[in-house]
Amino acid sequence: MVEKISTVRIIGLTGIPLVKAGDDLASIILRVAEVNNVKIEDGDVFVIAQKAVSKAEDRLVELDKVKASPEALKIAEVSGRDQRLVELILSESKRVLKASQQTIIVEDKRGLVNINAGIDKSNVEGQNRYALLPTDPDRSARRLRSRITRSTGRNIGVIISDTYSRPFRRGQVNFAIGLAGLDPFFDYRGREDLFGYVMQVKFNAVADELACAAELVMGQGKEATPVVIIKGFRRLTFNEGFSSKALLIDESEDLFKDVR
Amino acid sequence: MVEKISTVRIIGLTGIPLVKAGDDLASIILRVAEVNNVKIEDGDVFVIAQKAVSKAEDRLVELDKVKASPEALKIAEVSGRDQRLVELILSESKRVLKASQQTIIVEDKRGLVNINAGIDKSNVEGQNRYALLPTDPDRSARRLRSRITRSTGRNIGVIISDTYSRPFRRGQVNFAIGLAGLDPFFDYRGREDLFGYVMQVKFNAVADELACAAELVMGQGKEATPVVIIKGFRRLTFNEGFSSKALLIDESEDLFKDVR
């Protein structure tokens, strides 16, 4: 039906078992893809939920085993949050950007500006257990990519995605917090538009757009679809050396500085 | 191949002719869908690029016909922008949030926080012609939806999308600036996760995620694919009464206030 026209397919891999510490996520993904009869092809992008990667890498922490520092106690008081959770947040952060009753926002060790350093509770077993982000999501993505590439012989990309609140807009969307094998941007600058005008600012963060597209089938709760394969996206460059760090922006470069 | 598993398809409608003032966009879309053999089904979401809607609604302005006010002259001096373009920006804005050599950021008349009030030059014919956003993108979306629904008898959604820069992240992504017929959010709050934990914050802006997904086939330049149909997304509620205004957030509610 849609052979002649441009179609991107977002395929949720159903049947991924609950991920445990030490699991070989790449093998699980390839096995489930095979069972579902999803053929891996050149140019496929694997979008993998952060939580699954954190579990495989044993990044779960029991709150009862955390001891709050004096700084954590102070921020726990200001924010009304559990002092042990605050200690965890601090242990994952470079600096605290805001601490109030509403929220704790930090610049985390990876350079991400996020609420609670990306630490959260959902889909983690155990009443007081929280999941931290992978230590180095780009490294996690590179490992997954190299395993998938070796097994299939295909040139593919990997994105590790997480859910983020945003300034100015209500509701959350997914971002790419780690990636391997693909250029996170598609740059229109210097290209011509329909009428030969040379575009000067269009510079799309396609890695974030792919993460958003994946969320449409991923879901956040019982759906349990932590792995999504995106097929047919033609605007990517695939090769080594790309990093999610390119998606982070310095304060000096951030056009929205001082706006709110 | 992928019948049993969850798949969303993002279909770019190729062959949409250049849109002109007064064009009946709904008819054009339905004709091109038919030619491409894309069947319209219940639950389809039509994502339409703002520029196409602005052109059909004759929202193009010749810079030579604009006369700058004293306030525009002042901001033109601070920002180094053309004084007539600044006048256009002011005419579309409630208030200027930032004006510097780097950028002009406003809260526009629709409540959107955007650079240059969303006014831009790309894909607009004529050397000094700029496109303004539709006066009321929700109304534009409602009109398109009602035309498409009447012609097809299908319950569909319409999103009008535009490209936005964001705080904290490099590169641009698409947002939903107008919508009709669909709930812009999917709310997980109160639902259980994999382990029965009741989720407390997850609240996805699926309208923005759909806009991002559409951008993957839409492109920004010569691709000329201003209309995208998304099929198979199961997490939406379709009915009247939803508005893109719900995606806007008050300063008092914005967790990122005072962060940068």
Image (cartoon, coloured by chain):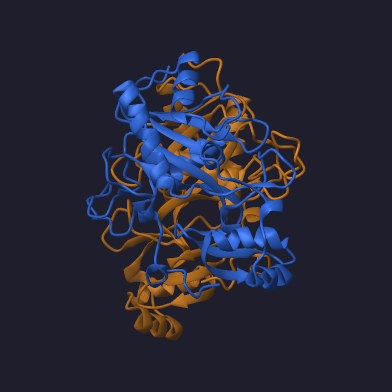
Chain colours: A orange, B blue
Q: Nearer the viewer, residue B116 or B210?
A: B116
Position of A34 relative to B77 (above/below): above
State left or right for residue B137 relative to residue A140.
Answer: left
Q: Quadrant of residue A72?
A: bottom left
Position of A151 relative to B220 (above/below): above
**Residue at the image point whose x is 57% and y is 53% from the top:** B118
**Residue at the image point whose x is 40% and y is 22% from the top:** A35
Would residue A141 be visible to someone looking at this image?
no
Q: Nearer the viewer, residue A157 or A143?
A: A157
Q: How many marks?
A: 0
**Residue at the image point whose x is 75% and y is 66% from the top:** B80
Residue A260 screen position, x and y as percent? 51, 72
Q: Nearer the viewer, residue A120 or B208?
A: B208
State left or right for residue B250 relative to residue B76.
Answer: left
Q: Nearer the viewer, residue B12 or A27?
A: B12
Would residue B233 be visible to someone looking at this image?
yes
Residue A103 screen position, x and y as percent? 39, 71
Residue B66 screen position, x and y as percent? 66, 56
Residue B63 screen position, x and y as percent? 69, 52
Position of A186 relative to A118 (above/below): above
